[in-house]
Amino acid sequence: MTAPVPRLLWIGTYQAPAAPAGSGEGIWRVGIGADGRFGEATLAATSPAPSFLAVHPTGRTLYAVGEDVPGSVRAFPVSDDGALGAPAVLASGGGLPCHLLALPDVLWIANYGDGVAASVPLDPASGAFAAAHVERFEGGGRGPDAERQDGPHAHFVAPSGDDVLVVDLGADVVRRYPARPGPGAAAVTAAVLLPGTGPRHLVVLPGGALVVAGELDARLHVLAPDAAPTAWRPVSAVPATDAAPGAGGGRAGGRAVPSHVALTGDLLTVGVRGTDVLAVHRVAPGDVPSLVAEVALGAGAMPRHHAVLGLAQDGRLLVVVARQGAGDLAAVLLDPRTGEGAVVDSLPLPTPPACVLEAS
């Protein structure tokens, strides 16, 4: 009997502690079996600080940020055997790019350092850059946290019909842009959160509501569609975690700091640094998340990003977590009925992992 083919992952990395910005080693390719066991890791490309990755819908191009000042973005052609070719490189339009959204004909970039959102057209057939430079959209505003909200900090881009939503941690807002901006395109404020929320990532619920992870207030904020088209208003908020903070590390500083959120059916998974857990919420009717379980990821894990890969061979959900603080990947199996789960395998990497992306 032929052994099942492992699922393949692209892994983006971040600089090691105390290393200079932009010194992350590169992009790794990792296999994982249906039982949650990792195969070997292979260095697919050397690239500066590729802390976030995205793949074109065709699977023929892999994009990587260069999280540095000034920032950059790279487009790697992907061959039929999964090898990465020499990349095309563009300036990201700002500093410290940290998130990408790849649509068939446009790539969006969130620059954390100065709050600039940027876009560049793509060749729909291949995903190659179709312009020599990005189009920049300046952010603006600040929040009450003097350290983290001294100015705009674009952190995440999500699709929303013919628009994209850009989450700004520094200004406590979500901005809306045309996904394919034409002449004179400008931002529209889609949602305003409470001062000091520090919105980081979001998911869109089936009914159109948003759940936004507040990095600074450690809460999940539910935003309902407003009367105005493509606008949302805050209606409720719940703690992202019940776990007590541990030693933390980095920006966690001994407190709960939500990072990435993902929606799978009615389960919302939230990586929380400081408490070092994968918090599992069930989204009930009325779009209110309710915490049902927490998976301990180990002291100092600092879960920066995770990907839900679907059902494992035993019917549980397979989740791969980038444990930036621990310097490894963790495979978690979750019971979709209860949310309970456990780490079943880990894979150390030479440079701390920061992004998990399933290969097309």
Image (spheres, rainbow, N blue to C red):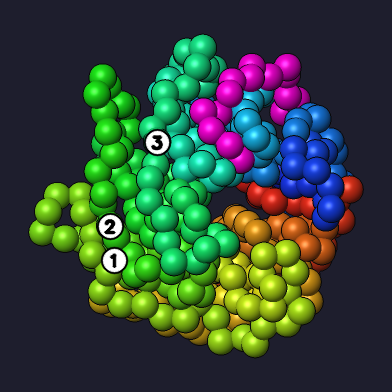
The residue where tag 2 is placed is 191
- Mark whose residue sits in front, 1 or 3: 3
Closer to the N terminus: mark 1 or mark 3?
3
- Type of amino acid under label 2: Ala
- Type of amino acid under label 3: Glu
- Considering the image in quadrants, where does the C terminus appear? top right
Report the residue at 56% width, 68% height from top: 258
Residue 113, image x, y percentages: 56, 44
Q: CA distance from mark 1 to mark 3?
A: 24 Å
Q: Which residues are magenta?
A: 82-96
Q: Which mark is residue 223?
A: 1
Q: Residues within 10 Å of mark 1 (few under 14, many from 20)?
A: many
The residue where tag 3 is placed is 138
Residue 85, image x, y percentages: 73, 18
Would you say 67 lies left or right of 41 here?
Answer: left
Closer to the N terminus: mark 1 or mark 2?
2
Regarding mark 3 in the picture, which secondary structure is present there? loop
Q: CA distance from mark 1 to mark 2?
A: 8 Å
| Quadrant in which residue 11 is drawn | top right
**Do tag 1 and tag 2 residues touch (Cβ < 8 Å)?**
yes
